[in-house]
Amino acid sequence: MRYGAATIHQRSPAMSEGRLADKAYSRIVEIIKVEGLDVGDRLPSEVQLAASFGMSRTVVREALIRLAADGITEARRGAGSFVKSRPSERLGAHMSLDDLSVTLGSYEVRFVVETEAARLAALRRSPAQMEAIEKAWTELRNALLSSGPAHIEDMALHRAIAAATANSAFVSTFDHMFCEVDRIMRAGVDISRSRPPEAIGAMMTEHEMIVEAIRLQDADGAAVAMRWHLLQGRRRLMP
């Protein structure tokens, strides 16, 4: 018990900094939205942001690094940080600004977990597991072609792929991220439906490529298709 308590105590400052970085992340997105900053506009400097938020420059810098990783800002050497893309206005209907950092940050974990899950599923899937993946894909396709939500079917397909790895740790990890993934899938379909039909068409093509690669037991193809789908999914959350 002493060891556990000491470990928690030692980690608490870092955990606190992580939460502060989440807040700084949200505040910077708020600045972009409230001040109407457009793509290419310069953000206030790290010093200005730190002073405005009452936080250290280290915390602000971490937030900016994460914003850049999520494609919202970009750093230019010697010039500061600039707006690269603005989150879709419809995104606010599915998550608050306070949740944005954690939710978009889950993509970094999904790139690792789901890309490898697709690879292993292509190598290990049994006929029954392939049948479950095909069934989930058919149901997702039908849902996407309808005018209703499709996040439940989307979740079912991704989970079926994780299950086909024959490693329960992939399913556990995917389930652990349920809240973040659910928000993303709800938002992704909603935002895509507000755009020309090609947006939903692209989403369908991405999933079909993953399923086809797993069907052909093309491990590298499945991994590439999954990573491409996740990259595109993150981009769909922007205008």
Image (cartoon, grey):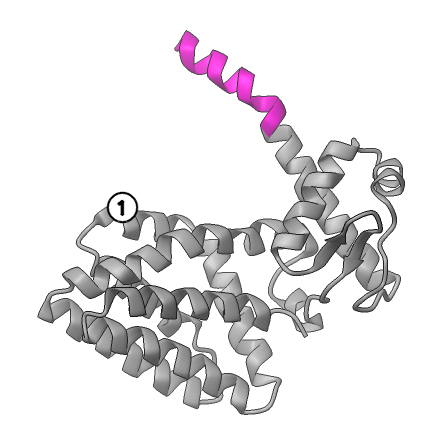
Does 6 sit left or right of 156 as displayed?
right
Task: Identify the image quadrant of the N terminus.
Answer: top left
Q: Residue sitting at 51 percent across and 69 percent down?
A: 233
**Given the current orientation, which residue lies at the most extreme left position?**
127
Residue 9 on the magenta segment: yes
User: Front-most of 98 and 201?
Assistant: 201
Q: Residue at x 72, y 56 (%)?
A: 74
Three-letter code, disc 1: Ala
Which stretch is magenta?
A: 1-14
Residue 194: percent from the left, percent from the top? 61, 84
Residue 204 spot, x, y in % from top left: 41, 83
Q: Residue at x 37, y 76 (%)?
A: 207
- Quadrant showing the C terminus: bottom right
Toward the front, the furthest residue is 77
Report x, y in % for residue 221: 30, 70
Is residue 131 found left or right of 29 in the rendered image?
Answer: left
Judged left or right of residue 176, residue 159 is left
Is 222 placed above or below 202 here? above
Q: Is residue 215 above or below residue 13?
A: below
Q: Residue placed farthest to the top in the image? A: 2
Prevailing SS of the magenta stretch = helix
The structure residue drawn at horizontal position 42% and vertical position 64%, both measured from the top left corner, is: 227
Q: Is residue 118 left or right of residue 201?
A: left
Q: Is residue 45 above or below residue 196?
A: above
Residue topped by disc 1: 169
Tell me the crowding category of disc 1: few under 14, some 14 to 19, or many 20 or more residues within 10 angstroms, Cα based.
few
Report helix, strand or loop for mark 1: helix
Q: Position of residue 30 (x, y in %)?
A: 79, 56
User: Looking at the image, which is closer to me, 102 or 77?
Assistant: 77
